[in-house]
Image: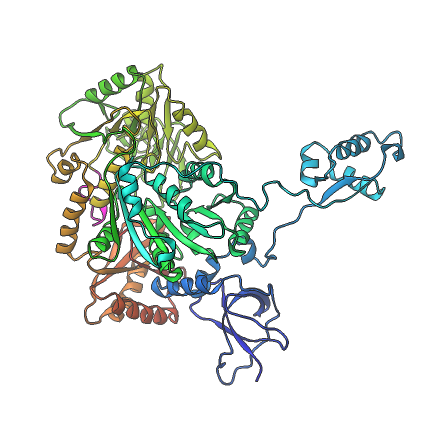
Amino acid sequence: MPSTARIALNRPLRRLFDYIVPEGLAVTPGQRVKIPFGRQQAIGLVVETNIEPPEGITLKPLHNALEEWPALPDETFQLLSWASDYYQHPLGECLFTALPPALRKGRPAMEKTEDWWQACGSSAALPANAHKQKILLDWIAQHKQGTKTSDIIKAGFSRPQLKALRDKDLIRAATPAKDISEGQHTETIAAPKLSDAQREAASQLPLPGDGFNASLLYGITGSGKTEIYLHYLKQNLTAKDQALVLVPEINLTPQTVARFQRYFGERILVWHSALNDSERLSAWLKIRNGEPVILIGTRSAVLLPFTSLKTLIVDEEHDSSYKQGEGFRYSGRDVAVYRAHLNHCPVILGSATPSLESYHNALGGKYQLIRLEERAGKALAPSINLLDIRSRPLEGGLSRPVLQALRQTLDSGNQALVFVNRRGFAPVMMCFDCGHMVECPRCDTRLTYHRRDRAMRCHHCDYQAPATETCPKCKSDAFKPVGQGTEQTEDILAASFPDTPIVRVDRDSTQRKGSIQSILKQVNSGKPCILVGTQMLAKGHDFPNVTLVIVINADGGLFSVDFRAPEQLVQTLLQVSGRAGRGSKSGKVVVQTCHSDHPLLKTLCHGRYLEMADQLLEEREAGQFPPFRAMAIFRAEADTMEQSLQILDSIKPLANAPGIETWGPLPALIARRADRHRAQLVLNTDNRKRLNILLTGICQTLEGQRFSKGAKWMIDVDPQETG
């Protein structure tokens, strides 16, 4: 009987495809193969071999294997298979997520080699009028070890000139000069010295050889968690080991990489979405080949094919950026914990504001809770003060006491940070005569006014229209911005402090490559300035000269319909507050609010996050929300709300099982986005295993059903957003 193989494709199909393996060819799970698929050829990944094909079906032979080795080693294959089952996503798409774009397209699993050239003749052999060729030949002759084509082009020469010299046998192919750093991982300095509190916390961390262990490192802002990570890796990682450090966003990567490179040199490797295809392939090959790298990467780095992984670190583990928002909706943090389990190695989850899920696991004994409640060095935790702005006059959202505090800070030669969690100039443009507000024609939301570009933009679908000075409805001149965004705050501060640099940090101001680095360089110079920004400023940045933090409006998450909103509000406020007083100077935080008597905000002033976490966990348990119950959401979108609700109405009877509670179906919080009508059905239960089995059955049933053209459904397990 001929050998057979079951193949997964990079397509949203919840099924696999069987093929005959040609005689003389051996394939293994995780290996890339080329197969016939309909009238086309496709790249697939082997899932199983020697399977029993269905009766009455003649199998096609696969063409060939693209490598002799599996692109996905056993442990990575197991991880992705588990993630496919847990998050209810097609196996093929999950497996291909672990491959760089170049390999998904079928390119060879090797880096592109570049031609090197050496001079082997004299310029006297060239015609008298071949001036440029003579200059090029002399230039190449100066590089005794040879030089590569890209450097020749950068020097101003052309490929035809290079070809002419090659055709005349005046240059020859050379062996690439060996990089002096190749094969060496320079470790420039010794492990950082730890304070007594840091040393006590570090001593509680399990060693790589002790097997699987999940530790929640609760360290207040400025306590030096990164120093503990560096010390831990420096002391416990051998020269042959791999390690993974996850960070929530690209904007944090340059800072983190720079710190790690001081201690580990060339051993540091990065992985994030801003890399091009060649850079991703190069990094992927180093990881797959078992090179002893320490990878610093965003969410998807946890899926890469490590072969000698000995430690995982998830920095800012509470951050919602670790949850993929579309397609394969996995949690990078939770997958990291399961990966450590498969690798029999420790995983360290670090945060000043741990997620309630992780904290609940620590309280239940699943995770080890390690406390670090002292700031590093001489730094002290900032004082947090609530400023009630009811009945106070505001200038662009800033009260007079806040402006006075900013003046005092700048006069003292220090820096300040103003947190505004809205980009643009104003969230609404409203006519004060007729009441008209400009709405997005494609979404159930209003357009945000961006004065810099004279544009009205939707932050949900990217719709854009030119801004007008008169009301589009009644043509009145009383057409004014309402509310404040980062642009308006920047303008108000620039007018109030004309001699002080105002540095805006949001998605609009950091779009250009290298912009975040130049901003950080300006701030780290220590000269007085005011930072204005969104949540991008709240995450992990170290500004030693910032002594004052102003929060413009802290009330947004107090009354949200999303049960996670209070947790996210507290985390954001404490994280942004933690930017103050990280150096030797004391810090102060002023939180503007219209609800200074709210118990959550009053507790916030003490700065003790775990007390608030205990309070929020009690509320979650009373409401039977995660982490006390398992949750999944079926989402539907279509051309009409009726079609979306019909899809969910067909799902609801399938979810009618003992112990499963359903909510809905109901329209989503923003019911129409990009002209698509969205609705959702929530499933809630105290039995995760039962939920997983039920979801598998529902997804298989839905896969075989046909819905209206353009209508689609998706599933989100352990959702971070319920609106």
Quadrant including the N terminus: bottom right
Above or below for 137 versus 400: below
Report the front residue among 56 and 361.
Answer: 361
Q: Is residue 372 magenta?
A: no
Where residue 716 sits in the image (x, y, percent)?
32, 58
In the rendered view, tell whether residue 587 sits above or below residue 615.
Answer: above
For the residue pair 237 and 99, the one nearer the viewer reads as 237
Coloured how?
rainbow
In the image shown, does 151 or 160 lie closer to the viewer?
Answer: 151
Q: Quadrant of residue 641?
A: bottom left
Q: Label the magenta part by its dominant secondary structure.
A: loop
Task: Tell me if 36 is positioned left or right of 320 in this view.
Answer: right
- Whether residue 372 is visible here, answered yes or no, is yes
Tell me if 25 is positioned left or right of 640 in this view: right
Q: Position of residue 151 (x, y in %)?
A: 67, 36
Q: Is residue 549 left or right of residue 701?
A: left
Q: Could you tell me which residue is drawn at 54 percent across and 52 percent down? A: 286
Q: Residue at x 57, y 48 (%)?
A: 278
Lateral position of residue 447 relative to residue 140, left or right: left
Residue 635: percent from the left, percent from the top? 31, 58
Q: Quadrant of residue 660?
A: bottom left
Above or below, 222 relative to 275: above
165 and 90: which one is in front?
Answer: 165
Q: Which residues are magenta?
A: 556-565
Q: Is residue 562 magenta?
A: yes
Residue 4 coordinates in the image, percent (x, y): 54, 77
Q: Is residue 12 visible?
A: no
